[in-house]
Amino acid sequence: MAGYIGNKAVNLSTSGADISGTANLDAVDIDGAVDFASTTAHAGNATFADNAKILMGAGSDLQLYHNGSASYITDQGTGNLVLGAADSIIFQNAAHNENMLVASQNGAVSLYHDNAIKLATTATGIDVTGAITVGGAALGSGGMEFITSTDISNASTASFTGFDASKYDSYLFTFHAIESANDGVVFYAKTSSDTSSHSYDGGSGNYVGEQVFQSDNSNTTSYLSYSTFAALTSATKPLGTDSPEPSTLNGTVEIFSPHLSKYTLLENNFAYISQNDQHTRSASSIWRAENAQVNAIQFYMSVGNIASGTITMYGRVNS
């Protein structure tokens, strides 16, 4: 049966209705399936009952639905569920006023707790805010944190001023392939208790301690009386530059209690080949002999420059 509604042709049959043009309907109640062969446009909401799914793909691969208790986005087919954004992908709460995760193009992926960033990726690793707990142990409390690293090239001194009493309890310095520009020298250190200009303490009674060194199966203990410097290697087994040494110095210095008005302890461990071609290990405990805080340290050779090497500084986070 054919006819017109207004100027629109309508063909009705037992299998359906064919309307030429646009049909404006106030309400539509459809009991069966609807097959759209082209684009549909909605100026209002499309409402789905609980457990009614939006199915996409030839095999209903992508499914969106709410089951009355939770909402689901499910990839049931082959391949991956891929989310993309021109700037960032952001997961938020229902009110859209708190972030939970933000993944930015060419930038950080940030995880939040109560709208505060706790972990974020960087170009070199990750940044963590707060403590890290593994198996019930808080690693962020008392854990080591990288502060800075210096590559040395023919420098008279290497100074470090990144001491921070509000953040760190102690400090660790690692020494990699340190070489002296001169033969027969000793590796020294001085500390500073001056918070402004960082003048380094070199008075006659500033440092005292004990040094043990092992060289070619012999052990020697020497005592550092009150001195103007902290000797980190042995004066009787000095560093050398001649072949086949060359005296490449490797080791650590750890500074304890620098932010207390007490004696600051430097625990030192080094290994190197001495001027007379002996494999030498030097360990020492040296105190800055004053009840004062330490806020900087300087390393240098007894004569000449530090030719090359790398020194890295770490801080032990306040417990």
Image: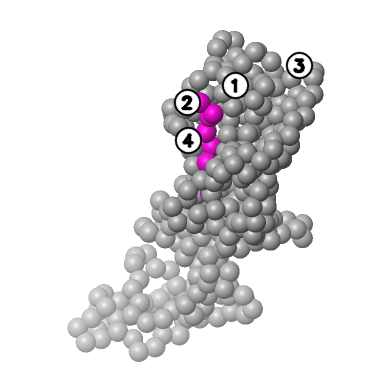
Q: How many tags in the picture?
A: 4
Q: Is residue 78 magenta?
A: no
Q: Quarter of the image containing the C terminus?
A: bottom right
Q: Is residue 301 magenta?
A: yes
Q: Which residue is mark 2?
A: 304
Specify the amino acid type for callout 2: Gly
Q: Residue furthest front?
A: 204
Of the two numbered discs 2 and 4 on the same chain, state the one appearing first in sequence.
Answer: 4
**Measuring 75% from the left and 24% from the top, which residue is drawn there?**
214
Of the two numbered discs 3 and 1 on the same chain, state the one appearing first in sequence.
Answer: 3
**Separation of residues labelled 3 and 4 (CA atoms):** 30 Å
Front-most of residues 301 and 53? 301
Q: Which residue is mark 1?
A: 239
Is residue 277 toward the left or the right of residue 82 in the image? right
Q: Which residue is mark 3?
A: 216
Q: Are marks 2 and 3 in contact (CB under 8 Å)?
A: no
Task: Determine if residue 68 is in view.
Answer: yes
Looking at the rendering, which quadrant does residue 228 occupy?
Answer: top right
Front-most of residues 52 and 135? 135
Is residue 17 toward the left or the right of residue 90 in the image? left
Magenta span of residues: 295-303
Magenta stretch, main secondary structure, is strand
**Measuring 64% from the left and 18% from the top, which residue is drawn there?**
274
Q: Residue furthest left?
A: 7
Q: Which residue is mark 4?
A: 157
